[in-house]
Image: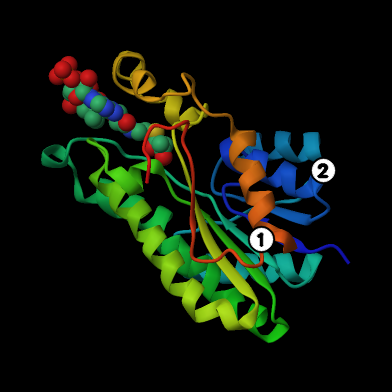
Amino acid sequence: MARVAVVTGGTRGIGAAISKALKAGGYSVAANYGGNDDAAQAFNGETGIPVYKWDVSSYEACEAGLKQVEADLGPIDVVVNNAGITRDTMFHRMKPEQWTSVINTNLNSLFNMCRPVIEGMRARRFGRIITISSINGQKGQMGQTNYSAAKAGEIGFTKALAQESAKSGITVNAICPGYIATEMVKAVPQEVLERNILPQIPVGRLGEPEEVARCVVFLASDDAGFITGSTLTANGGQYLA
Ligand code: CAA
C-alpha cells in the first residue's frame, strides 16, 4: 500500500512542488492549506491531490485535520512541515502580533502537527518528519527576528526529536532552502532583492521549488534511513553552514 504523506502549506509555492513530487514518487498525499481556497481548488483540479483546510497554528485544528486525513487515506507515514509566513520588519518597529503570528505558524505548528501522529509512527516503527526551515534560521536575517527565531527553533526541534525517535524507525530532518522563486521571496522589495540578495548567491539565481521538493523525496525514502537529525542546505552557496 502507498505510504501516506501530509504536506502543510501544500497547495502553493514550495509546498505544492513537494506535494506533486511525493505523488509522483508513489505516495498518497494530503495537501493542507490555511486560507487561499481559490489556489487550493486550482491545485486540486490540476493534480487530483486532495486538499484539507486547517490552521497549523492551532493544536485542535491539527488534531482534527490529521484525524480526517487518516480516516480518508490511512495512517500517516510522512509529515512535511512546510507551512510558513513572513511578517518582515525591523525589530524596533515590530508589533507583538507580528512576532506571535510567525512563531505560532512556523514553529508551534511543529508541535501541533507531530504530536498527534508520533505515537502511531512509534507503534508502527516507521516515520519520516521533514521540516522546511530556512537559510535565515541558520544565519539570521535583518528584518526577520521573528522568522529567524522560528526557523532556528525548527532546527533545534528536529535535532531533539531525531534523538528520541531513532530507535523507533522514525527519522526527523530539516531542509534549509535559500531564496527560492516563490511568492514569499517576490514579496521582498525588488531593489533589495537585486541589490542585496541576488549578488550573495554564488550560483547566480533564485532556487526553484522543485529543487527543494527533490530533497524531501530523498529524505522520505527508505534510502535515507540512516540520515536523521540532519540539516540539508539548499541555497545556491549563499551560506555555508
Ligand atoms: N540583505 C542585506 N541588506 C538588506 C536586506 C537583506 N536581505 N534587506 C534590506 N537590506 C538593506 C537595504 O538595502 C537598506 O540598505 P540602505 O540603507 O543601504 O539603502 C537597509 O537594509 C534598510 O532597508 P529598507 O530601506 O528596505 O528599510 P525598511 O525599514 O523599509 O525595511 C526590511 C527593512 C524589513 C529589512 C526590508 O528591507 C525587507 O523586507 N528586506 C528583506 C528581508 C528579507 O530578506 N526577507 C526574506 C524574505 S524571503 C524568506 O523569508 C524565505 C526564506 O526562508 C529565505
Left or right: 97, with 124 as reference point: left
**Mark 1 / mark 2, whichever is N-terminal:** 2
Q: Which color mode does the image show?
A: rainbow
Count of residue discs = 2
Give the residue pinned by disc 2: 48
Kind of residue at disc 2: Gly
SS for dot 1 = helix
Left or right: 210, with 81 as reference point: right
Which corner quadrant holds the N terminus?
A: bottom right
Q: How far from the left and from the top, in percent, is residue 91?
A: 16, 41
Q: Quadrant of ligand 1?
A: top left
What is the spatial separation of the Cα atoms under label 1 and label 2, in whole angstroms? 28 Å
Q: In the image shown, does 99 or 23 lie closer to the viewer?
A: 23
Give the residue pinned by disc 1: 224
Quadrant for residue 150, please give it.
Answer: bottom left
Which residue corresponds to the image point at 73% horizontal and 42% vertical from the top-left? 20
Which residue corresponds to the image point at 69% horizontal and 50% vertical from the top-left? 217
Q: How far from the left and from the top, in percent, is residue 241?
A: 37, 46
Classify 10 Å Cα crowding around label 1: few (below 14), some (14-19), many (20 and above).
few
Callout 1–callout 2 Cβ contact below 8 Å: no
Residue at the bottom extreme of this rendering: 123
Which residue corresponds to the image point at 29% horizontal and 43% vertical from the top-left? 139
